[in-house]
Image (cartoon, rainbow, N blue to C red):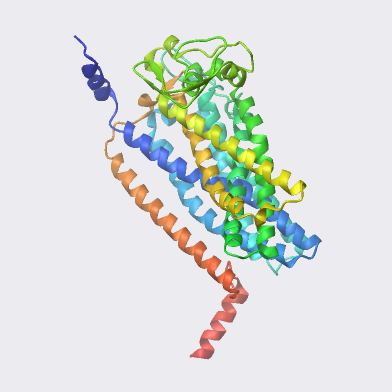
Amino acid sequence: MLTPDLVVDLVTVAEPAGLLPARQQMALSLGWHIILACFGVAFPAMIFVVHRRGIVRDDPVALELAKRWSKVSAVLFAIGAVSGTVLSFEMGLLWPGLMGTYGDVLGLPFAFEGLSFFIEAIFLGIYLYGWGRMPPRLHLLMLLPMAVAGVVGTFCVIAVNAWMNAPTGFRLTESGEVVDVQPWAAMFNDQVWLQFAHMWVGAYLVVGLSVAGVYAVGMLRGRRDEHHRLGFLVPFVFATVAALSQPFVGHLLGLGLGDRQPAKLAAFELAETTESPSPLRIGGWYADGEVHGTIDIPVLGSILAQNSLDKPVRGLDTIPEEDHPPVNIAHWAFQSMVGIGTLLAGAVALFWLARWRGHDLLRNRWFLRFAVAAGPLAVLALESGWVATEVGRQPWVVYGYLRTEDAAGSYSGLWWLLGTTVVVYAAMTAGAVVVLRSMARRWRAGEADLPSPYGPAELAKSASTTGGER
């Protein structure tokens, strides 16, 4: 007789040895890298705005902001290059069943992503070296290909993830062989544009609030000069547009989820049974086939999830249990994303409403404290969104075609790779913090900044000075 404990043991035995470490490794790598990817997408546009303002208005404060932000961007790009390289190797190493079967389908976006990375690196180097060496307007234009390359690279990565949620561009034979591969169709699948828009807007929200929060800290410490006000307002404007538009983008992305991935939607909404209309369930958990501890708002679930007053959300009881995702993780991640996003949208709307009524909230210490916390909150919302997307798709890595356990390898030594990655990422994080804090201290003290990068003129001057001292 199969008891529940025996079933669990059999499932555990059936899982390949590399499945759990592969999951943990990807969670760490993607969760860490996605924050850096946001800066690659959004930061060049913000630098462009302050640099252009400095040229057009002959504003030295704006030009100084552009110069400092570009150096911060270079530090983040450097450590992002390491984590991105790690990710490119991980796909084949951790998920041989995925890349071995579908590598031909996914090769195109990965190739474009690599090309975009090199273009972004080249123009970032030109921009950094161009201060005082290029005509101002030509120097400014170096930001455009850097910004475009960052967006294109992110689009390519999102295209792969969107394809996993809506696989297309191939045909699977009865023997499991992938034939009739159409790489362009796979890259531009049905979900890619809205999923990319969701990530793109989220990147501006994360970067805008994170950068604004840095200057909010300065204002809390009494530094209320034009440098700090402009350093706050420019990224905050970007974050405002992102925060107010993100709920609409997310709603459009969610429409039709009940038809594409009913188990994911049921987990998001904590729908134990099919109800018409479906309530919105806030909080709570799912255990032993039942929902507990929720706050139910009638009808609102159908409105938000299905854009209808009576269309039901399909219940988990109608879906085979082996096709259920980890319900509680998906539910709480989704609700965290939506709840934090709603809070941030309300906060930015309040700021501009108060400003329109003649109240400057930058003089309000409570608002500045919230602005400091808003950056980490935006990061948490971003991470929660990715958890909801990835965990909600389980147990599939390619939805409807390839289960995650079938994509993993059998090599248990991946735990050593995970441990090494933790050490490397911790060291890079600590190094980035030390470098950025050192730069900030020099800037606050008004000390001469170190040249970045070291050009021929600086090297010649350094050599001359060293020879004189000797």
Across the whole image, how many numbered discs are drawn on residues?
0
Q: Quadrant of the N terminus?
A: top left
Left or right side of 431 for 338: right
- In the figure, 465 relative to 425: above or below? below
Residue in the picture at 46% in, 63% down:
434
- In the figure, 371 relative to 460: above or below? above
Q: Give the camera-side residue of 433 and 331.
A: 331
Residue in the picture at 53% in, 39% down:
382
Left or right side of 344 for 417: left
Residue 410 seen from this side? yes
Residue in the picture at 60% in, 53% down:
368
Q: Give the camera-side residue of 411 and 23.
A: 23
Residue 88 seen from this side? no
Q: Position of residue 87 (x, y in %)?
A: 45, 42
Q: Position of residue 317 (x, y in %)?
A: 42, 11
Q: Position of residue 61 (x, y in %)?
A: 71, 65
Q: Position of residue 216 (x, y in %)?
A: 60, 56
Residue in the picture at 39% in, 16% down:
290
